[in-house]
Amino acid sequence: MKKSQREIINIITLVIILVIAFSISNLFNKSIKEENSLYDTQNANPATANEIELELRESEENTYDSEQYTDSIIDDLTSSEEEINFSPKAAFIIDDLGYEREVAKKMIELEFPVTLSILPFLQYSEFIAEEGRKNNQEIILHLPMEPSNSSANPGPGAIKSYMSEEEIRQVVRDCILNFPYIMGVNNHMGSKITENREIMEIVLEEIKGYNLFFIDSMTSKNSIAYQVAQEMGVKTAVRSVFLDNENDMEYIKGQMLEVQKIALREGEAIAIGHSRINTFYVLKRMIPELIKAGIEIVPVSELVK
């Protein structure tokens, strides 16, 4: 074989060897890549599982937080409902009953609770007590007491500062037993008595013995009657507003607005008015307005503590 032919054969053989080597190298690299890819995929699975688990945990935590948030909303709604349902209360005492019957009957027939405070030993005292009971109105004794102004007459059955302890006790008993159905007592006049601790202790001891409550009418800014009643464990309360110190309808209307303001601010108010036709007309007209404002009208016995 000629030399040139052998060289050609050698070149062809070399090329074939190179092609085969290149193919084998590609196959080997592909195999390695697949193995690496498989290895990467296998190693990636735990991480993916951890991420999924973390997402699930976060989702559970978010759900829990949402439940807590919902609970807080429910609590807020409950709180709001309690505030909406919260009912300020106002009580109206009609004093000085017993002198006449016509206006007294109008007061008794009002379509909301009033507490009838009746003076003892007067012409219509028992009549008003009986009519009040028939109309389911609350009845209390308007107990006369000596005022600081000695020229003012508190009427029959009054407690006087010069009386002995036994005389005071007997007067209180007589007044309480003068007519039935009473649930409590408030003072008529009495600024000289309600400032006197010794006398008030005697009076309140008798009141407590009959299981009655006591309302301090606060005819004196220096009255200690309410304080003494609290100390002695007598159920008690104190007047908030006088309605009709002036017998004028505009004035009485202004005092009714004061009752509304106090009731809404403090939760309760006790107003004292008298058996007067102007007071009757204002009560009849304005009580529905207080009710619309969210104030419950109650007998005064619901406000004693």
Image (cartoon, rainbow, N blue to C red):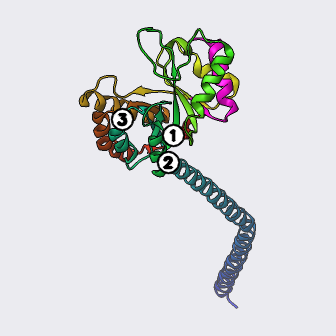
Q: Is residue 12 left or right of residue 112?
A: right
Which numbered dot is residue 139? 1
Q: For the residue marked with disc 1, what is the amino acid?
A: Ile
Task: Determine whether 17 is above or below 132 in the image.
Answer: below
Task: Determine whether 290 is above or below 231 in the image.
Answer: below
**Nearer to me, 43 or 106:** 106
For mark 1, give the secondary structure.
strand
Alpha-carbon distance for marks 1 and 3?
A: 16 Å
Q: Main secondary structure of the magenta part?
A: helix
Q: Which residue has dot 2 on it?
A: 133
Q: For the residue marked with disc 2, what is the amino acid?
A: Arg
- The image quadrant of residue 225 is top right
Q: Quadrant of the N terminus?
A: bottom right
Which numbered dot is residue 100? 3
| Tag 2 and tag 1, C-beta contact below 8 Å | yes
- The image quadrant of residue 48 is bottom right
Q: Earlier in the sequence, mark 2 or mark 1?
A: 2
Residue 122 is inside the magenta segment:
no
Which numbered dot is residue 285? none
Residue 213 is inside the magenta segment:
yes
